[in-house]
Image (spheres, helix red, strand yellow):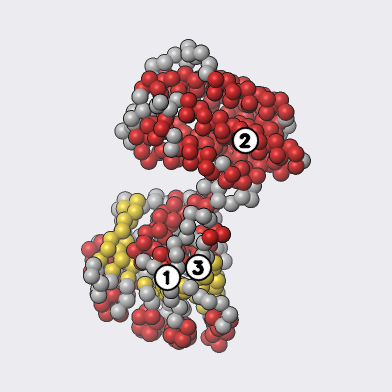
Amino acid sequence: MKRPLPGAAGLAARVVPRVLSVAGTDPTGGAGIQADLKSIAANGGYGMAVVTALVAQNTRGVRSVHTPPVEFLREQLLSVSDDVQIDAVKVGMLGDAAVIAEVAGWLRRVRPPVVVIDPVMVATSGDRLLSPEAEQALHEVLPLAGLITPNVPELAVLAGSRPAGDWDEVVRQALEVSARWGVRVLAKGGHLDGGTVFDALVDASGAEPVRRLQAPRVPTTATHGTGCSLSSAVATWQVTTGDWLTSIDRAKSWLTESLRHGEELRVGQGHGPVSHFAGLWERGGLATSASGEWWQRIAQLRADTVTDPFLTGLADGTLGKDQFVGYLAQDTHYLDGYAAVLSRLARMADDPVEQAFWAGSAAACLTTETALHRAWGASSSPIDPIGPVTRAYLDHLETATDAGYEQGVAAVLPCYWMYADIGRQLGPSAAGNPYREWIDTYQDSLFGESARSARGIADRAAADAEPEVREQMWQAFEASAQLERRFFAAGSPA
Ligand SMILES: Nc1ncnc2c1ncn2[C@@H]1O[C@H](COP(=O)(O)OP(=O)(O)OP(=O)(O)O)[C@@H](O)[C@H]1O
Ligand SMILES: Cc1ncc(CO)c(N)n1
């Protein structure tokens, strides 16, 4: 069954794949079923789970495994398949031969349209998750998969060889396994060294037997459960794309981003989990906070801002120098007034942390400005007369702050947040760009952190505010966002 691609219209117009994970548990939430459910949800699916084994494990290793009777496994599997139409199944830890036989029998009866089997044998910690006798029994279940996803040591076991030492050997083993077991293989190269991680989609019977994928290796210790998370993500995507390479590609992009944010979670002392929802949180896909909702409401405005000719010219380096200097002159006026408003907020705040944040921001604002201007050989005092958009923006900030602390906080937020967002989007094009320093200033992770702090303050203020004040906060926020856009447009090539 092939489903339409999820459209841009959002969740309402979108088919949500119903994806079942059949796997073991990880009470620390980074691997096994717990990771699978997060991964399925993060990739747009509805997750379900049947437990094959209860694993007492954490980021450092496995303590013990409890395998419930296979009769109970059967009860769980039938509870799902008797009631729910399953679009995809991801199979993870199977533990022993009896579990494998049970799952194989169920798969043969139910025939889910998408089956991904992660032949889990050892955890990232090195602990075994499959009894050696059960390796034989895998013969029964692996051919039922549309895709199997072994890592380097697992591939070696399936190929009956030593673990591959380099990428060519991985591909050779994957071809062997694919031919011998009659399955499509995603050979994962996470365990090899090097600045790039390679994976390969191998189908010995296909027209193009080896298709390679590569991604930058994320320097992180947070790699616990990457295999679980990847296989569930691929299973989820396969329901909507119907094409394995596309599904793997999407799952990989998501995983790389989630790996980048894993350490921020500070979970455990060993190999920590990836941050499954980092992308969603980053892009404000959740409207659980007032600011998240405001951010979504200005989505069109934000899209129009990043495609403004001034910013596209800045991104590709074709923007005229005069224009950039003209923009900087207006920005000097703006930052002077903005720093004054931030100082006002510092005085108005009753929380010492918030006072310090606004005062620190006012200072950073003035020093960043001088640094940028020095780089462009301009004086740090404004020479050009103040323009109409700059005037309107500063008047708005003052008026909003006159109305109250909450409104002032909401009014200053777009300046942090939209610039951090623009820096993030323009960052990748910064190398060799004449405006690199400007882009780097806003791409800087410290700037991103300030934006998050400002957002946190606005959310706390909104949570405590009366409905009419919260409405005024939104209006102040939106007006500032509009003025941000006009500020760039004022410097656009005619
Ligand atoms: N540091 C990293 N940076 C980027 N990608 C990585 C990194 N580590 C692993 N990956 C990717 O994650 C996926 C899983 O790879 P890996 O070979 O580690 O699987 P695994 O050993 O089954 O995972 P685990 O046992 O931790 O669940 C692969 O697509 C791999 O390329
Ligand atoms: C339950 C379970 N499945 C898979 C893995 C592999 O990371 C793990 N550590 N735990």
- The Cα atoms of the two marked residues, 3 and 2, are separated by 36 Å
Q: Which residue is mark 3?
A: 17
- Mark 3 vs ligand 1: CB below 8 Å: no
Which residue is depicted at the point 36% across and 28% down? Answer: 319
- Where does the image place residue 167, in percent across and percent down from the top left? 25, 61
Q: Are marks 3 and 2 in contact (CB under 8 Å)?
A: no
- Where does the image place residue 155, in percent across and percent down from the top left? 32, 71
Q: Label 1, secondary structure: give it.
A: loop
The extreme front residue here reads 494
Image quarter for ligand 1: bottom left
Q: Are marks 3 and 1 in contact (CB under 8 Å)?
A: no
**Among the two numbered marks 2 and 1 on one chain, the one whose residue lies closer to the N terminus:** 1
Decide if residue 108 is in sight here: yes
* Foreground pick, 303 / 59: 303
- Where does the image place residue 194, in percent across and percent down from the top left? 30, 53
Q: Quadrant of residue 47?
A: bottom right
Q: Amino acid under label 3?
A: Pro
Mark 1 residue crowding within 10 angstroms, few (<14) / some (14–19) / many (20+): few
Q: Label 3, secondary structure: give it.
A: loop
Q: Amino acid under label 1?
A: Lys
